[in-house]
Image (spheres, rainbow, N blue to C red):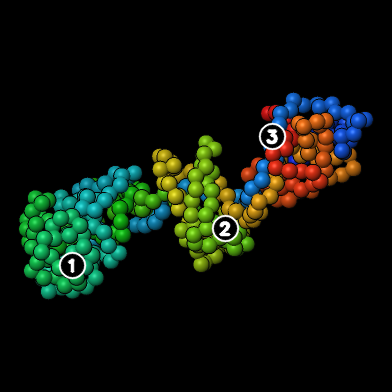
Amino acid sequence: MKRKTIIGGAAVMVVVAAGVGVALNVSVGGGSGARYRPSVSTGTAPVERGDLNDSTSVDGTLGYGGERKLMAGAAGTVTWVESSGSTVRMDAKLYELDGRPVRLMYGTRPMYRQLKTGDEGPDVLQLEKDLSALGYGGGLTVDQKFTATTADAIKRWQRGHGTKATGTIGPSDIMFAPGPVRVMSRDAAPGDRVAAGRPIVTSSSTERVVDLKLTLDQVSLLKKGTKVTVELPGGRNTKGTVGSVGTTATKDRGDGGDGDQGKAKVNVVVELDDPGEAGNLTQAPVTVNITTQTRKNVLSVPVQALLALPGGGYGIRVVGGGTPRTVKVDLGIFGEGRVEVTGQGISEGMKVEVPKS
C-alpha cells in the first residue's frame, strides 16, 4: 500500500533539496532587507479554494471477471471449439460435440437434463425466457411449465438453425451461463473424446474489472459501492466502483516484496464505470487510488510551492501586488498534487512561486 500523504511528504523534500538556495536567502515577511536569489527557474500558481482528497494507492490487475470452467453437458467427440479471446453471446455456438453445435443460452441454472413436455422447474423458466428473447416464443407463456406451446417454440428454434424439429432440448444442444462469456482458453481440442462434466473451455464474463488482494486493514477502507480512481498503463485515469468485497481472508504466500507477503488477504473486485477506457488490455498491472479523507472548502497550493524555512517549518513565496514575500504556513492534508495550507494573510487567488519543470 502506498499512502499519498507519504508521497506528498517526499515531494516536499524534493522541492526543499532543489530550492534550498531559495529558502536560505529569504526573510519571512519580506522586509526591506530581505534578499531573494532564486537558484531555480520559477513560475506562479494560484492559491485555490475547494475540496481536497487524501488517498491511498494499492496495486491491482486489470482483467475480466467471473472466471469459471464450462463443462461438457454430454459425452462425445469434440469436433470444434470457439477460439481463445472470442466472445460468445446468446444463441451463438460455443463448441461442437459429434459435429452437433452446442449453443449458449442465458441462465444461472445448469442444463442438466433433457427437457420435454410435462417437465417443470426453473430451468424451464430460463429456457422459455431465452426463446422469447430470441423471437421464437409467439404465444408462449413464460413460466416454469414445459407445455405443448414450449415444444412448438423449441421446434421453431430448431428449424431456425437447420436441425431436426423434435420439440425437446438437452445438454447436447445448449449450455446455460449467466450472460455473454469470453473464452480465455480451450480445455478440450477437436478430436478429444470427453465425458459429461469434462471442461471444454475456461471462460470469463465480458466485464472489465480490477482484481485486488488487500490486507485486512486495507479492506476496512472499502465497501461495495465505494468510488475509486484507476490509473491505467500509460498514465490514463478512469473511474471505478467497488463491486464486491470478499468475506474470506487467505494467506498470501507470494514474495511480492511489498511487505505484505504472508499476511491474510481478501479479494476485492473493482468494476470500471466506463469499460471502454481499458481498450484492448487483457491482463495488465494498474494502481487503484482510494480516497481516505476529504477536507471541504480549504485553501491549497501545489506541493512544489512549499519551501523549507531556516527556523523550521514551511512557507510559500507570495508574488504580485507589491514586494514578493515569504509567508509561513501550516500544512494540512496532501492530495492530488496539492497541499492544504493555512497562514496569516493567505487568501484564494493569491499567486505563489513554483519551480518550473
Which of marks 1 and 3 precedes in the sequence? 3
Closest to the observer, 132 or 314: 314
Q: Residues within 10 Å of mark 1 (few under 14, many from 20)?
A: some
Left/right of residue 275 with respect to residue 357 in the rendered view: left
Q: CA distance from mark 3 to mark 1?
A: 65 Å
The C terminus lies in which quarter of the figure?
A: top right
- Dividing the picture into quadrants, the one containing residue 39 is top right
Q: Are marks 3 and 1 in contact (CB under 8 Å)?
A: no
Q: Identity of the amino acid at label 3?
A: Ala
Element at label 1: loop
Q: Can you tell which mark lies on residue 142?
A: 1
Left/right of residue 323 with respect to residue 153 in the rendered view: right
Q: Can you tell which mark lies on residue 45?
A: 3
Q: Residue furthest front?
A: 321
Q: CA distance from mark 2 to mark 1?
A: 44 Å
Residue at the disc numbered 2: 214
Q: Can you tell which mark lies on residue 357?
A: none
- Dividing the picture into quadrants, the one containing residue 235 is top right
Q: Residues within 10 Å of mark 3 (few under 14, many from 20)?
A: some
Closest to the observer, 289 or 175: 289
Above-or-below relation of 347 to 39: below
Spot occupied by residue 9 in the image (x, y as percentages of width and height):
73, 45
Spot occupied by residue 8 in the image (x, y as percentages of width and height):
70, 44
Q: Is residue 8 visible?
A: no
Q: Identity of the amino acid at label 2?
A: Leu
Q: Identity of the amino acid at label 1?
A: Val
Mark 3 or mark 1: which is in front?
3
Mark 2 or mark 1: which is in front?
1
Q: Are marks 2 and 1 in contact (CB under 8 Å)?
A: no
Q: Residue at x 79, y 43 (%)?
A: 345
